[in-house]
Image (spheres, rainbow, N blue to C red):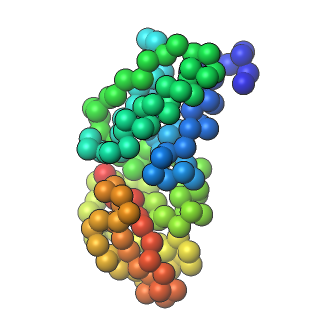
Amino acid sequence: MNAELPLKDRVLEILSQVADPEIPCVSVVDLGIVRDVRDGKVFITPTYTGCPATAVIEAAIGKALKDAGFALKVATMLSPPWTTDWISDSGREKLRAYGIAPPDRGTAKHSLRDVPVECPRCGSRHTEEISRFGSTPCKSLHRCLDCREPFDRFKCH
C-alpha cells in the first residue's frame, strides 16, 4: 500500500481486495457498495435494503481496515439507494466472466423487460427470463435461447 496516497485512496485500495460474499469474483468497491470515506467512517450502501449479506460485508470491511491499521467505523448509507449504474466497468467484466449478466449502464431506470439481456457466455441477446428470482434476491434467472445455458442477471435498480 502506498502511504503517500490520500486516505480515501488507500482505503479504497484495501477494500478493492474485499470480495462480495455472494459473488466472490467482484469486490465491494467493484460493486459500488463503498460510497465514501470521510469523518472517520467508511460509508457503504447495500445493493438493496434487505440484503442478507450486509452484516457480512460490514464485518469483512471492518476486518480489512483493522488488519491494515485503520481505526475507521463502517456506516450504512441508504440514500440515495444503490443502483446497478454504480458497478464499475471492471466489475461488469468480472461479473460477465463469472457467468452473471450485468445490466447495461443507464438501464437502472427501466424495467428488466424493456432491455434485452446479453448472455454472458455466448453474447447472444436471444434470451428469456425464467424467474424474477435467481441465486440471490438481487438477481433474476435467465436462459440463452442460442447456447441454451442458464445464467443470473443483476436486477436493474
In the rendered view, tell whether residue 133 sits above or below residue 60.
below
Q: Is residue 98 visible?
A: yes
Give the side of residue 12 with respect to residue 58, left or right: right
> Which residue is found at the position 27% from the left and 32% from the top?
79
At 37% across and 38% down in the image, what residue appears? 54
Kindly indicate the quadrant of the structure image that contains residue 152: bottom left
In this rendering, the answer to whether 58 lies above or below 138 is above
Measured as percent of width and height from the top left, residue 131 is found at 29, 73
Name the residue at 26% across, 63% down. 111
Name the residue: 45% across, 72% down. 151
Q: As drawn, is 1 to the left or to the right of 150? A: right
Q: Quadrant of residue 156?
A: bottom left
Figure check: 34 above or below 9: below
Q: Is residue 89 in view from this perspective?
A: no
Give residue 59's quadrant in the image.
Answer: top left
Query: Where does the image place residue 108, in percent across and percent down from the top left?
Result: 33, 53
Horizontal side, residue 111 vs residue 23: left or right: left
**Quarter of the figure with the N terminus:** top right
